[in-house]
Image (spheres, rainbow, N blue to C red):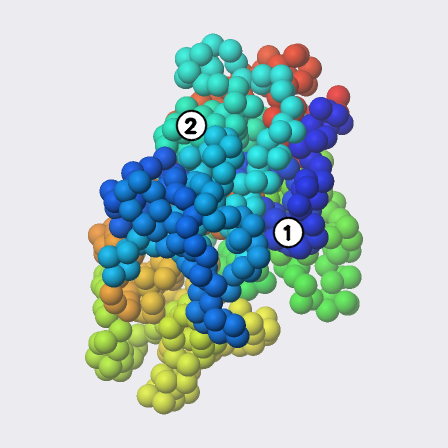
Amino acid sequence: MRSTQLNPLFASLRGIKGVGPKLSHAFGKLLRGDENLEARKIDLLLHMPHSLIDRSLQPGLAYAPDGVIVTIRATIDKHLPPPRNNRRVPYRIQAHDETGELTLVFFHAKGSYLEQQMPVGEERYISGRLERFKGEAQIAHPDHVVTEEEFASMALLEPVYPLTAGLSGKVLHRTVIAALEELPELAEWQDGPWLAQNSWSSFHEALQRVHMPLETEDIDPLSKFRQRLAYDECLASQLALSLVRKSVKKEAGVARRWQGKLAEALTAALPFSLTGSQTKAIDDISNDLTTPERMLRLIQGDVGSGKTMVALFAAANVIESGSQAAMMAPTELLARQHLQSIKPLCDAVGIRVASLTGKDGAASKREKLKALKDGDIDFLIGTHALFQDKVEFADLGLAIVDEQHRFGVHQRLMLSSKGRATDLLVMTATPIPRTLVLTYFGDMDVSLLTEKPAGRKPIATRTMSMDRLGELVHGLQRALQTGAKVYWVCPLVEESEVLDVTSAEDRFSSLKEVFGNRVELVHGRMTPDEKSAAMYNFKDGEADILVATTVIEVGVDVPDATIIVIEHAERFGLAQLHQLRGRVGRGDKASSCILLFKGPLGEVSKARLAIMRETEDGFRIAEEDLRLRGEGDLLGTKQSGTPGFKLAQMEIHQQLMEAARDDARLIIENDPALQSPRGQALRNLLYLFGRDEAIQLLKAG
C-alpha cells in the first residue's frame, strides 16, 4: 500500500486553482504523453527546467543593451490606443525612467485591461526583451508588469521548461509553485554519510531549488541539487531491478543436467566455426543452467555477431536435459527468419522445431498448441502470440527473448512464468554502453559477443551529397551487372509536407523507371503477406533492389546483398545507421554503404557521419550515440514502455548509476523486504519514481 503521506503528490493537477479541463489535457500530453491521462503533481514536480531567464539585469534605459531581457523601473506617461476598427496598428504605452524613454507595444490588446494594469502617473517594474527601433527603446508584450510590492516577491531567475501546445511557461511555473506548496517533508531514504560526502540537501530542498533557483547554477545537471535528484531516480531504478532479480532468483531454479550430445552434433553440422566470444557465451550459459538458481542472462552482440547460434546451443542443452525452449521475436518477419535459419540445423540433429505467430490458421494453431502441451515440440519460435493464455508448454525450461529493448521487464517475466523455474536468456543486436546496460538490464548477467564470424569482410562506408544522385544510380547499374543486390532505405513511407525528405514510395517509382521490375518496395504499412512477398522476391527472386523504410533495420538476412544506400542519413541516429549498415556484409563478398545526405549539415549530423566512416565497432558507435543523443532515443524507450529517465542523464550521471547499483545491492542484502526505517522510506522513493511494480514483488506488500 502506498503511504497516505504521498497522496497529495498523486492527486490530479485539477486540484490546483486555475487548472481546468483544457489545461489538464495539455498537462496530460506534456507530462504523461497522452492528453486523456490525468497529470499528477508528482509528474509536474519531476518535470525539469532546461534553462533560465535572468531578470536581474536592471541597467536603466540609457544603459540597457539591445536584444537582451532587462527589468526597468518606469513611470507610465501616456496610453496611445490604435484607431478604431484598425486592429493592425498596435496599442502603445509611453513610459520613462531617470535615464530615458520607453515604448511598450501590444498587438490585439484589450485597452481597458492595460489602463487598469498601468494607470498613467504610476510606477511599474517592467521586464521583457528590449529592442531599439529607429533609436527608440521598445519592449513588445513584456513578460511581467508589476507594482513595487509585487516586484519584492518576484523571482528574478525564472526557469524555462519544455512545453506543449496550449501551455505557456508562465502558467506552468505558477502551477509548479502551487504543487511545491503541497510537497510533504518525507523521511530521508538516502544514506546519511553518502549525503554528507556529496554535500547534498534533502529531496524537498533539492526540488525547491531547481524550480525556484537562487543562482543560475542551481538547474545545471551537475549542480548538487540536480545530482541529488538524479541519484534518487538512479537508486529507484536499480532498487526496482534488484527486487525483480531477487524475486526471479528466489523461485528455485533447476540444476539442469545433460551429456552434450546435441551440442556436439550441432557443432559438426555447422558450415563454419564458432567465434571465441560465441564459445565463451555458450559456456557462460551452460554454467548458469547447471546451478539451482534461475538464469537471467543478456547476450549483447553487434549485428552479425551470431547471437541466434548462441541461443540455439543454449536451447539444445535445455532440450537434451528433458525440457522445452521458446524464442520470442518482436515481428512475424523476424520469427519466420529465425525459423528458416535454424530449422536445417534442428532437423539435422533431431530437435523438433515449430513457429507460432498471429498468422497461423485456426486448425494449424490447434495442432501446434496440442503438440506443445504434449511435449511433441522441443523448440517454439514466435511473436507476442507466445504470451497468450492458450499457449501451454509440457515443461518450458528456457525462454529466449530477441531484441530485448522492445519488451519491458514484465513481458519477459510473463514468458518465463509459462514454465516452472524457467531460465531466461535475452538478446539484443543494439550494442549498449555499459552505463545503459546497468540502467535497463541491471537485473541481468551479461555476455558480450565482440567478434564477427570468420570470412566477413569490412564494409566500405562513404558519404555522398544528394546532388550526386544521378551519378549513384549509374554506379548501381554497373553493380547490378556483376550480380549485386541493393537495399535503398528512405526515412518516410509517403511524401511529407513538413519534411523535405524523399519518401520510400516516390523513390520506388523513380528507380522503377530506370530498373523496371527489378525493384521491390517494403514498408511498415504493408500487410505481413505483402512484406514477405517483397522480401522473398528480393532474397530469392527477380528483384535486385529493395526500397524500404527502417522496417529492415533488425534481422532481415540476405547474404547476397552487398550495397546499402541510406537516403537522408543525416536524419537517422547513429545506432540506427549502424543497424541498417549491418544488413550488408553478411556473406564473403566485399560490401559498401552509401550515406546520402542533404546539405548543409549541422555539427551533430557531421559528427555522426564521420564516426560511421571511421568505425564498424558497434560499442564505440553506441558510446558516441549516447553522447550525441541521450539514452531515451538510443534504446527506443520512448516507444517501448521501458522506463525512460526524467532527471538522470546517463551521458552526464554515469557514475551515479554505478553507485546506485552498488547501493541497491547492499540494501537488498541487508533489508530484503524493505522493513527497516530506511526501507520504508525507500518504498516511498519507488512510488515517487513510478517503480511501484517492484513493490508488488515484496511479500509484505
- Is mark 2 in CB contact (under 8 Å) with mark 1? no
Residue 226 visible in the shown view = no
Q: Is residue 510 above or below residue 1?
A: below
Q: Measuring 44% from the left and 41% from the top, which residue is drawn there?
A: 123
Q: Which mark is residue 23?
A: 1
Measuring from the top left, give residue 478's x and y in whole percent: 23, 81
Report the residue at 58% width, 16% height from top.
188
Q: Pinpoint residue 302: horizontal percent, then vertical percent.
A: 38, 48
- In space, the residues marked 2 and 1 are separated at their CA atoms by 28 Å
Give the secondary structure at mark 2: loop
Residue at 43%, 54% in the rendered image: 78
* 119 over 548 or under it: above or below: above
Which residue corresponds to the image point at 36% horizontal and 35% vertical from the top-left? 56
Q: Amino acid at mark 1?
A: Leu
Mark seen at residue 540:
none
Which image quadrant for residue 525?
Answer: bottom right
Locate the C terminus by quadrant. top right
Q: Residues within 10 Å of mark 2 (few under 14, many from 20)?
A: some
Would residue 92 be visible to someone looking at this image? Answer: yes
Judging depth in this view, the residue of 22 and 95 nearest the camera is 95
Residue highlighted by disc 2: 214
